[in-house]
Amino acid sequence: MKNSGFALNGRRLLATTATGLVLGMAVATSGQAQLRPSEEDVAGIQKDYSPYAGRNTRGGGFADSLLWGDTHLHTTFSMDAGMFGTVLGPEDAYRFARGELVTSNTGQRAQLVRPLDFLVVADHAENLGVPLLLAEGNAELLENEYGRRFYDLIQEGNGYAAYDLWGREGMTQFIDVIDDPRIQRNTWDRQIEIAEEYNEPGVFTAMLGFEWTLSGTLVDPGNLHRVVIFRDGADRVSQVLPFSLFDGQDVELLWDYMQNYEDLTGGEVLAIPHNGNVSNGKMFALERMNGEPIDAEYAAMRMRWEPLVETTQIKGDSEAHPFLSPNDEFADYGTWDKADIGGIIPKTPEMLPFEYTRTALQIGLQQFMKLGVNPFKMGMIGSSDSHTALSTTRDENFFGKMDTGEPSPDRWKSYVIQAFGGDEALSTFEYDVLASGLAGVWATENTREAIFDAMKRKEVYATTGTRIAVRFFGGWDYAEDDAYRPDVIDIGYAKGVPMGGDLEPAPEGATAPVFMVGALKDAWWGNLDRIQIVKGWVDTEGERHERIFDVAVSDGREIGEDGRATTEVGNTVDVENATWTNTIGAPELRTVWTDPDFDPSVPAVYYARVLEIPTPTWQAYDEARLGADMTPEGIPRFHQERAYTSPIWYTPPE
């Protein structure tokens, strides 16, 4: 009876509830019919009620998607990767970037903590794919004299000798020792096909590109490499072959190739110069490669084709140098200043201003005053330059520069650059490298077109490997509380310009530019120490200057009247165990800052630098995990990861 009564009561309850629901639905339906706005009512609304309708189009002016990628990755298709032992190809690179578990070149399991959003496999154009074809025993290649010599050396287990032969008798002499277009067409078509297979708009973007690799000669060396990136897919890109060093040794010839591509296909292309720190003063030189001074036409062409510069990567950081920025206590980071890319000519102080991005931005202002055009009006980007096909840019998951630098107790001893000139003091080793870097792109969507467009307008930034989210806007009337508004991004675009932009002319009554900046920590890494704004300008005498302002700091520290916070954030790193805690720093920082020293008569450039709290380096992880015993002095066991935004420029009114 109790069970029966319970069931009866349950049925009654269910019936009552169901009736209520039905009646409620009827009332709601009736009410909806009465309250639904008419077409005339809707037509009378002058503006979309939804604040997000159309906002992620360029017409709306919003780039809402922060996408992470690597624009500079090499696989076995590159001579200086495949010859040394890299066996992973573009397919492996894309699978790894998409977050899949892969087996490394040395047989170790590897995976990213989070997938990337896009990748450019930028294998060297010079004899593209020859290592792969050698491994396959390609008959056409083995008919070639040098192809056979390379093959025999590799079969003997002496890949470095094959690479050295190619370098000395080919690359450094500007001689294509293979000289068979069938080989290049074979491998270029394969690269395009693989990229098309892995390109999935809205999910993952496989951008097509290659590297043009001018390193100079044995008597006049210098890194002038460029990564060339296409906006387009196979239908257009397959109409051309990559432009190699053997096709031309002047960057202006590369620009001609790019112009010809656009004329032929109707597509678009850009180039990103590599890290300038191993160029021996050539990357931002004031002379063209033919020895003539740069002029306005050259400056305009450079900015037409090269809107960005790679500021940080495995081969050191090129944002700033302590010799050039003695008042910057954070400038000596990942410093490579022994020699050029070949370890041939020692570095001299005179070379440094033409190698580092911060100083180059100021030199660009000087040239603007002289030529009327700024040749170095560059946004900043970071990428890896890994030659393992694995884009690993976090210290606890770092797989090295080459396959010889994959995790092992002694990897720190391996060469990255073995000095061609024979002076071992000019060689660099795995222990010198950074686990860097990444490209952050503010795009409207995850597609080739949207990412390329963001790069072209310079709404991008660099990090040294972690995923710090940064926004940077410049204008004339941001209010102090604008940075804390929920519609902060709308305000950023409405009142000013984003990173990569030019300040609009000052409105009447404005006395100084105002910048709004915010940063959010990588959810899987260290808290934030501070946000800085780095200002560069040129005075009326044409002399360049710089100043650093701490604009937002963590832990309640004070910023003095000189614009600096002298109290350090602290350090929780346990070097012996390669651990740290997020008990210092802040998960987020944001502020609005007005330039206190603004002179409206001189040009200026501003960018934001964001610093994390100290965390262990990959060298510390190797010692803790692998028992590595690194003996050279000066190897860092902790450092402060960082981000560099693309700048915002101010130009005086005429």
Image: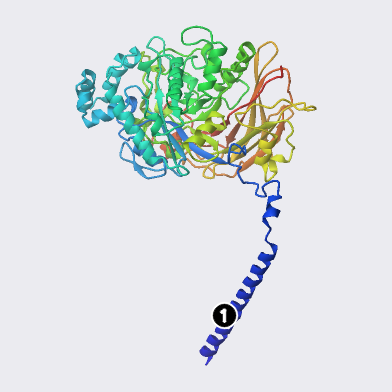
Can you see residue 419?
Answer: no
Say which amino acid is labelled 1. Leu
- Which quadrant would residue 261 be assigned to in this image? top left
Left or right relative to 490: residue 268: left
Single out the residue that lies furthest toward the top. 292
Q: Position of residue 215 (x, y in %)?
A: 40, 17
Colour mapping: rainbow
Can you see residue 402?
Answer: yes
Q: Nearer the viewer, residue 30 or 541?
A: 30
Q: Quadrant of the C terminus?
A: top right
Q: Vertically, is 514 above or below 60?
A: above
Residue at the spot x=73%, y=23% of the render? 598
Q: Nearer the viewer, residue 620 or 294?
A: 294
Q: Position of residue 71 (x, y in %)?
A: 45, 31
Q: Position of residue 642 (x, y in %)?
A: 55, 33
- Which quadrant would residue 149 be assigned to in this image? top left
Local crowd at mark 1 within 10 Å, few (<14), some, or many (≥20)?
few
Q: Vertically, is 252 above or below 241?
A: above
Q: Nearer the viewer, residue 553 or 28?
A: 28
Single out the residue that lies furthest toward the bottom. 1
Q: Secondary structure at mark 1?
A: helix
Q: Vertically, is 134 above or below 64?
A: above
Name the residue carrying label 1. Answer: 14
Single out the residue that lies furthest toward the right. 509
Left or right relative to 472: residue 125: left
Residue at the spot x=38%, y=14% of the render? 423
Q: Position of residue 609 (x, y in %)?
A: 60, 31
Q: Nearer the viewer, residue 158 or 388?
A: 388
